[in-house]
Amino acid sequence: MAYDSENIFAKILRGDIPCNKFFEDDHVLAFHDIAPQAPTHILVIPKGAYTSYDDFAMNASDEEILAFTRAIGKIAAAAGVVEDGYRLISNTREHGRQDVPHLHVHIIGGKKLGLMLPRD
Ligand code: AMP
């Protein structure tokens, strides 16, 4: 899947549209989800042009992968969800119901969450 540089997170990374920033370093940006589904709902994205977690895992540099993984830990701690727990989600392509085609991990917490998936 080719990377679409007009996706909304690419625009946030370029500064074309604003975000409610939570964390930033050389490789990673995190910001509050615009439509939070729990008291804590933060999106963590790599600055590189990766469409999905599998794309990132296969094609990113070791430095980018290390930075992204460490950032998720730091952000969860800074958001105050580590003790009570939280959920990491990375929806991927059509079956995963991914809306924005730039890799993002949702950090969701701040309350006891429902079932991982609706039973249908
Ligand atoms: P997904 O369905 O996993 O691709 O998630 C995309 C997420 O991006 C959704 O939870 C949206 O609410 C969120 N979102 C879309 N546009 C923005 C934006 N401009 N700023 C922050 N979050 C956004």
Image (cartoon, rainbow, N blue to C red):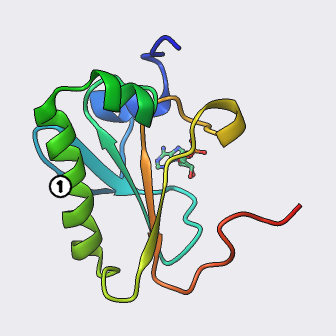
The answer to whether 120 is drawn above or below residue 10 in the figure is below
The answer to whether 19 is drawn above or below residue 2 in the figure is below
Nearer to me, 92 or 58: 58
Q: Residue at x 16, y 37 (%)?
A: 27
Looking at the image, the residue that sits furthest to the front is 58
- The x, y position of residue 66, in whole percent, is 15, 44
| Left or right of 108, for residue 120 | right
Mark 1 close to ligand 1, CB under 8 Å: no
The total number of labels drawn is 1
Q: Quadrant of residue 63?
A: top left
| Left or right of 103, for residue 47 | left
Q: Residue at x 52, y 86 (%)?
A: 111
Q: Quadrant of the C terminus?
A: bottom right
* Label 1 CA crowd tier, 10 Å (few <14, some 14–19, many 20+): few
Looking at the image, the residue that sits furthest to the right is 120
Nearer to me, 68 or 78: 68
- The x, y position of residue 31, in whole percent, is 34, 54
Asked if one can make out residue 83 in the rendered structure from this viewpoint, the answer is yes
Looking at the image, the residue that sits furthest to the top is 2
Secondary structure at badge 1 equals helix
Q: Amino acid at mark 1?
A: Arg
The answer to whether 105 is drawn above or below residue 55 in the figure is below
Which residue is identified by label 1?
A: 70
Nearer to me, 107 or 16: 107
- The x, y position of residue 37, in whole percent, is 59, 68
| Left or right of 17, for residue 113 | right
Q: Residue at x 61, y 31 (%)?
A: 93
Asked if one can make out residue 23 in the rendered structure from this viewpoint, the answer is no
Q: Residue at x 22, y 43 (%)?
A: 28
| Left or right of 67, for residue 33 | right
- The x, y position of residue 114, in whole percent, is 67, 78
